[in-house]
Amino acid sequence: MTTALIAALSTALALWLWTAPDSATTRLTRLTTGGQKPRRIPLSRLISRPTPARRADSWRRASIELCQALSAELSAGRTPGEALTRAVAAVDLPSPETLRPVLAAARDGGDVSAALIAAAPPQGGEGLRQLAACWEVGVTVGAGLAALVERTAATLRTAQAHRQDVAAQLAGPRTTARLLAVLPALGLLMAAGLNMHPFDFLFGSLPGLMCLTAGIALDVCGLWWTNRMAAKAQA
């Protein structure tokens, strides 16, 4: 029981050290604020930082909105350059500065298609690359750009809906795998609460250390294998 309490206190201390500012920042903040304590960064804010998957999903959603807005502006009779400028301004992009070269190319009569391809992120930039292809076809062949962009938006919406459906179907297996990975730790805590001293065996003897190492290795391998299968299915 004492070992479990020490582990819990160590975890709490690690979280506090992770979210607390460093000593230099603390001293500088106290000097500039008259001795007031600095504001700490909430843990929820750190946890909610965008991951590559979330960032890619944000770009996919923004690409759909951009195609829809561009199609509406073109249907209203505006020139392609003006329509693209207004569409970019109307869409909430994950990184607005990424499309600044695209706006400059549209304003100055440059190669908008090449600028779109260069601005498209590696993950989640499929919509921008398809929009670049539409722009290239509309400029070189003279096809109706509004119709091409609208068709691209419909294709992106279908792909996004399929991607969300697959992610929803994989949410159950992923949650089950994480729950099964946590169950051994809960079992150890229950055993410690019943004064069975599992931590003394795991950390105080060679067979216990071998069992602990093997259990952690199998637990990590199981999580990795489940995530790998889910990632392959989602891809």
Image (cartoon, rainbow, N blue to C red):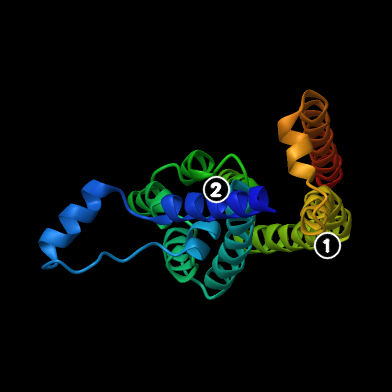
Where does the image place residue 13, in percent across and percent down from the top left?
Answer: 48, 52
Q: Nearer the viewer, residue 214 or 68?
A: 214
Quadrant containing the N terminus is: bottom right
Residue 76 visible in the current orientation = yes
Q: How far apart are the alpha carbons under marks 2 and 1?
A: 39 Å
Sooner in the amino-acid sequence: mark 2 or mark 1: 2
Question: Identity of the amino acid at label 1?
Answer: Ala
Q: Quadrant of residue 169?
A: bottom right
Is residue 221 toward the left or the right of residue 49 in the image?
right
Q: Nearer the viewer, residue 204 or 9?
A: 204
Q: From this viewpoint, which residue is outermost toward the front?
A: 195
Where does the image place residue 17, in percent across and percent down from the top left?
Answer: 42, 50
Q: Quadrant of residue 117?
A: top right
Is residue 166 toward the left or the right of residue 153 in the image?
right
Q: Identify the residue at image location x=22%, y=47%.
A: 24
Q: Identify the residue at image location x=47%, y=46%.
A: 112
Mark 1: give few (<14), some (14-19) or many (20+) Cα within 10 Å: few
Q: Identify the residue at image location x=52%, y=64%.
A: 44
Is label 2 in a helix, a strand or a loop? Answer: helix
Question: Identity of the amino acid at label 2?
Answer: Val
Residue 127 visible in the current orientation = no
Is label 1 in a helix, a strand or a loop? Answer: helix
Q: Nearer the viewer, residue 109 or 28?
A: 28
Quadrant containing the C terminus is: top right
Q: Which residue is mark 1?
A: 168
Where does the image place residue 97, in percent across and percent down from the top left?
Answer: 38, 53
Q: Which residue is mark 2?
A: 139
Q: Nearer the viewer, residue 176 or 12?
A: 12
Q: Which mark is residue 219?
A: none
